[in-house]
Structure formats: structure tokens, C-alpha cells
Amino acid sequence: MNFIEKVFNWMVMIGLGLLVGRIITLVFRLLDIPFTTFFKDYSIISLIILIVGAIGSQMMKDNKK
């Protein structure tokens, strides 16, 4: 169980990092500053990673109680 909990926590961290990247990309696009399209291209995948990680982390916390 400890390994699975760490995987979910890492998924949340990776998802949050990608979310920050998407926000930065949006700001640069609104300011017409050229920036990488990596975060725009993989936005659905990063949302899925964040949601799965958050749900998994919450379930692991509930199982501990």
C-alpha cells in the first residue's frame, strides 16, 4: 500500500507541474510571446494524471483512517 500511495502522490505532483506549465503557456499566448506548445499539446493527459492522482491520494487517506 505504501508504494501505491507514493505513486498517487507523484501523480498529483506531476499533474500540478503540468497545470502550472499550462497556465504559463496561456499567459504567454495572451501576451503574444512565443513559447513552447508542449503544455498545450498534452493538456488532456495532464488533467487525467492530476485527477487520477488526486482521487487515488484521497482514497489512500480514507483507507488509513
Image (cartoon, helix red, strand yellow):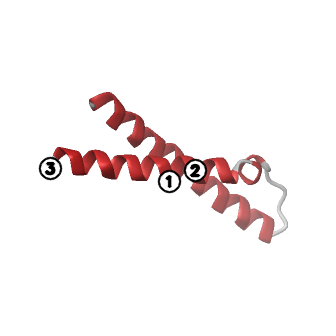
Q: Nearer the viewer, residue 10 or 1?
A: 1
Residue drawn at the location 65% of the way across and 47% of the way down: 45
Q: Is residue 32 left or right of residue 49?
A: right
Residue drawn at the location 58% of the way across and 56% of the way down: 20
Q: Which residue is mark 2?
A: 48
Q: Nearer the viewer, residue 44 or 10?
A: 44
Query: Which quadrant of the rendered structure holds the N terminus?
Result: top left
Q: CA distance from mark 1 to mark 3?
A: 22 Å
Marks 1,2: beta carbons within 8 A: yes
Judge the density around disc 1: few (<14), some (14-19), many (≥20) Cα neighbours within 10 Å.
some
Q: CA distance from mark 1 to mark 2?
A: 5 Å
Q: Quadrant of residue 31?
A: bottom right
Amino acid residing under circle 1: Ile
In the displayed orientation, state which residue is furthest to the bottom: 30
Residue drawn at the location 31% of the way across and 49% of the way down: 59
Locate residue 21, reporting x and y percent: 64, 53
Identify the element where label 1 is drawn.
Answer: helix
Q: Nearer the viewer, residue 49 or 24?
A: 49
Amino acid residing under circle 3: Lys
Q: Is residue 61 left or right of residue 31?
A: left
Marks 3,2: beta carbons within 8 A: no
Mark number, residue 13: none
